[in-house]
Image (cartoon, rainbow, N blue to C red):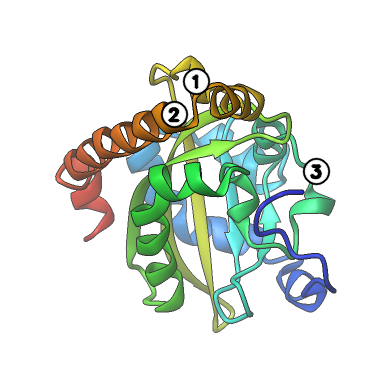
């Protein structure tokens, strides 16, 4: 079971409503994406037709319950291991670690900040966070996530652009199975380790928010 994944009827209407709007949304954010992520024009051209496998991005609808995804790029499918048919209509929390306690200790405060950003659409406002994410295979990675509110045809959306950071990944949490094994072996020590790691990541997040990228994103 994937933590937080809806099992009831998905908000297909929101997905259908966004169909065909991706090129228009991309046009609105093209300049800022080129500036922030050094994306070249030919890559943006490929991304417009969702044929680029280099830019990991997704769009969600904050006007719908639980802010469901309405678009994911080809690269998003590849890095996450989830096909678009699975992603669309779901909140993106399926990327968070399946272990609830690990997720709370490592991502808790960032998830809270992210929810607050999504619940209060302000066109043009942006947000940067650092999350421990988990692929469908159970392999984990550090995700530097940039989000911005964009309006297309008088409807607010949230664009998210992911960058996979090559930070050293402790063996104990590198995969879902590794974490489960360590918890079975020495649960108390593992929770102390996760809490300590969460504290170190929070320090890195504070530095990130004070960085030039965070300043640009908050402008």
Contact between marks 3 and 2 (CB within 8 A): the answer is no
Kindly indicate whether the residue at mark 2 contacts the one at mark 1 (C-beta within 8 angstroms). yes
SS type, badge 3: loop
Q: Which residue is mark 2?
A: 190
Residue at (40% x, 53% y) in the render: 108
Q: CA distance from mark 1 to mark 2?
A: 8 Å
Indicate left or right for 190 with 22 as reference.
left
What is the distance, in whole Å, between disc 3 and disc 2 at their CAs?
32 Å
Instruction: Pick the quarter of the image with the C terminus.
Output: bottom left
Tell me residue 68's x, y (percent): 65, 67
Mark 1 element type: helix
Dot placed on the residue nearer the N-terminal end, 3 or 2: 3
- Closer to the camera in the image, 29 or 209: 209
- Tell me, for residue 172, which label it has, or none: 1
Give the percent coordinates (x, y) of residue 202: 26, 42
Q: Is residue 213 left or right of residue 100?
A: left
């Amino acid at each position: 079971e994937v933590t937080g994944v809806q099992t009831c009827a998905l908000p297909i209407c929101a997905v259908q409503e966004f169909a065909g709007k991706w090129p228009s949304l991309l046009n609105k954010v093209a300049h800022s994406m080129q500036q922030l992520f050094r994306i070249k024009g030919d890559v943006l051209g490929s991304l417009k037709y969702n044929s680029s496998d280099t830019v990991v991005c997704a769009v969600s609808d904050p006007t719908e319950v639980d802010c469901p995804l309405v678009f994911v790029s080809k690269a998003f499918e590849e890095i996450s291991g989830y096909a678009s048919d699975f992603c669309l209509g779901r909140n993106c929390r399926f990327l968070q670690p399946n272990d609830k306690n690990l997720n709370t200790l490592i991502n808790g405060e960032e998830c809270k900040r992210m929810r607050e950003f999504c619940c209060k659409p302000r066109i043009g406002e942006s947000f940067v966070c650092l999350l421990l994410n988990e692929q469908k295979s159970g392999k984990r990675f550090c995700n530097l996530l940039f989000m911005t509110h964009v309006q297309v045809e008088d409807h607010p959306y949230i664009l998210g652009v992911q960058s996979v950071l090559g930070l050293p990944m402790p063996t104990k949490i590198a995969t879902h199975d590794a974490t489960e094994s360590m918890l079975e072996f020495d649960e108390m020590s593992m929770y102390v380790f996760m809490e300590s790691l969460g504290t170190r990541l929070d320090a890195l997040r504070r530095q990130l928010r004070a960085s030039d990228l965070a300043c640009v994103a908050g402008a």
